[in-house]
Amino acid sequence: MKMKMKTVLSLVVILAALTGCFSKESKNADTTPLQTTPTTSTSDFKLSDREKEVYYNFQKDLNEQHLKGLEPISIAKLYVQARLDNKNDVVYALYTNKSGYVQWSKEEDKKIPSSDRGTKEQILKTFANIDKGKFVQSSDFEGYIEYQSIEEAKSKSGFKMIKNDDGIWSVSFQPIQ
């Protein structure tokens, strides 16, 4: 038992030393953390007034007619906002319903644990700059938003979109390419 206590105390002392708890200089040192990659906050991600209105109306009844006329980038932004708000029913409703493109049911979606859906920080990092992206239509009913990833400065990300049979753009299941 004494050996375990000595080991635990040794670990505490080592951790304290590594974190600077015993350093006299740490009181006067600059405590600003170094940032090697840009960070994104919810204040960096904004919906336009029109997108806010559509998002508000859409989440009330999940009727995709609210989305009619919105550009693919706006639909993607609604998807990101719904992910940030943990509105999984809205996220699922923004996925395509086009035959042959549905990858899981709403019931299966409800079983996905929140821990597998990502944190706000992860979501913001993944979709940072999507609003500055460019939509590339690759067929009559497919396309993607090309945007600059913040994870790798020279890397571009793609966000796949599918046009439903009623002409409304929607999010592909597993949209990141």
Image (cartoon, rainbow, N blue to C red):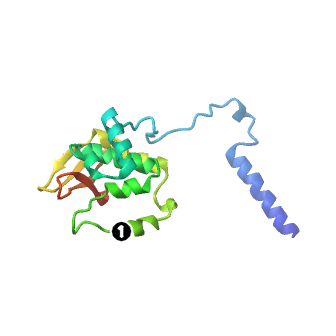
Q: Position of residue 57 (x, y in %)?
A: 35, 43
Residue at the farthest front position: 61
Q: Neighbour class for label 1 at 10 Å: few (<14), some, many (≥20)?
A: few
Residue sitting at x 28%, y 66%:
102
Q: Position of residue 144 (x, y in %)?
A: 22, 52
Q: Nearer the viewer, residue 65 or 145?
A: 65
Q: Position of residue 169 (x, y in %)?
A: 22, 51
Confirm whether residue 33 shows in the render.
Answer: yes
Residue at the farthest right position: 2
| Residue 118 located left or right of residue 129 | right
Q: Quadrant of the N terminus?
A: bottom right
Q: Nearer the viewer, residue 63 or 104?
A: 63
Q: Is residue 69 above or below residue 90?
A: above
Give the total of numbered labels: 1
Q: Nearer the viewer, residue 6 or 35?
A: 35
**Looking at the rendering, which quadrant does residue 2 occupy?**
bottom right
Q: Is residue 122 above or below residue 133?
A: below
**Looking at the rendering, which quadrant does residue 55 occupy?**
top left
Q: Amino acid at mark 1?
A: Ser
Residue sitting at x 30%, y 35%:
50
**Looking at the rendering, which quadrant does residue 96 occupy?**
bottom left
Residue at the farthest top position: 28
Element on which disc 1 rests: loop
Residue sitting at x 36%, y 51%:
61
Q: Which residue is mark 1?
A: 105
Q: Position of residue 91 (x, y in %)?
A: 38, 54
Q: Quadrant of the C terminus?
A: bottom left
Q: Nearer the viewer, residue 132 or 4?
A: 132
